[in-house]
Amino acid sequence: MRMIDLRFSLALLLPLLAIFNLWFTPQHAFLSTLAIWLLIAGLDALLPFQSPEPVDVRTSQTWFLGLLRLYVPLQLFLIGLGAWQAMQSEWLVVLGISFAVGFITGAQGITFAHELGHRQSNFDRLMAWVLMTSVNYGHFMVEHYKGHHARAATYDDPATARYGESLYRFLPRTLSGSFINGWRLEAQRIAHTKSAWHKSPLLWSTLVAVGSLLTPFLMLVPALGGMEYTPFAVKITVFLLLQSAIACLMLETINYIEHYGLQRQSAGGKREPFGMNHAWNADCFVTNSLLANLQRHSSHHMHAWKPYSTLQAMPNGPQLPTGYAGCLFIAPIPRLWFALMHPRLKALHPD
């Protein structure tokens, strides 16, 4: 393994920093997380848009896969620590803790769940389900692989943003569409395989997620002596809901960014194969190191089976104005987003 490939171990730095911040200074969780986010966005903007060349697909993937697996217990510990600190904190601090945890579970947790879900190992897919269940978004595990990858960059895909569509118009469509499609696809799978709903991982993921939100009320109130202690339970539940909401909002905002305005053509009822020009890319060293090369998004869609370390840059394909960290600040401002993206779209189709 080349020393440069150790860069992916930076991915563990963010959850470790979050754990450190929550453990010692939970009252500063919001500002600390915002500072880290701004730092990453700044480094993406200042450093050259050149990540190292991909690892050869024949190279052992043990190290790269091990990093993803190691992240899973870190996230579970982070959520548990966040719940513990939220229970003891003032409401304003609870909001800050929720933001700090949701930033990690959204930016990295969902990204790594996405990568683990693309692996063929049952264990890795189970770990992906664990991560997505921890943010109450289990239907992603069905809709993304069976829905989004088949329909990306088409009007049939709720997770593809259309030309001129603001983030605020996109979010209701993708949130509802992805949820409905996830359950519809799972029902089709069960009918096709002649399985049963009690064997559905989506159903179990949903039950576990709902149970985690009810548990504080079922366990903490009796243990602490009565209804006067319900604020503790309420704070934990609010924390769990808010960190999930922030994580899912980050996911869907990234979805908005990844395929904005790009469309595959259809002819004779058949879609054009997914190509280089159907996803936006950003070859930023820092964010690609933290997010398992997710910004090499064209390569991922063209070769969904390929491990993240082997994804290739597409310098001649659609390029974002900056990395995902910066785009997350730009996308919520429609006029600025359109001003930056529409000239890029016109350059792809000059005629």
Image (cartoon, rainbow, N blue to C red):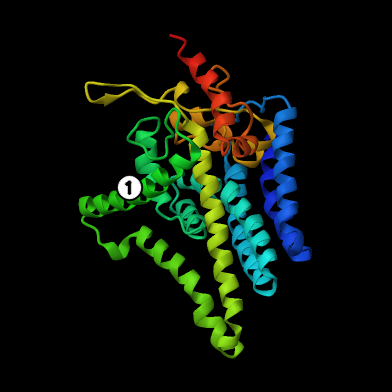
Identify whether 205 is placed above or below 124. Answer: below
Residue at 58% x, 19% y is 315
- The residue at the far right in this view is 24
- The residue at the far front in this view is 335
- Which of the image's four quarters has the N terminus? top right
In x, y percent, where is residue 139?
39, 53
Query: Which image quarter: residue 150?
Result: top left
Tell me the residue that label 1 is attached to: 181
Identify whether 343 is placed above or below 44. Answer: above
- Nearer-the-camera pick, 266 or 235: 235
Residue at 71% x, 55% y is 30
In x, y percent, where is residue 269?
23, 25
Query: Which image quarter: residue 90?
Result: bottom right
Residue at 52% x, 60% y is 134
In x, y percent, where is residue 231?
60, 78
- Nearer-the-camera pick, 121 or 231: 231
Judged left or right of residue 348, residue 103 is: right
Q: Amino acid at mark 1?
A: Asn
Residue 303 appears in view: no
Residue at 49% x, 55% y is 132
Judged left or right of residue 256, residue 268 is: left
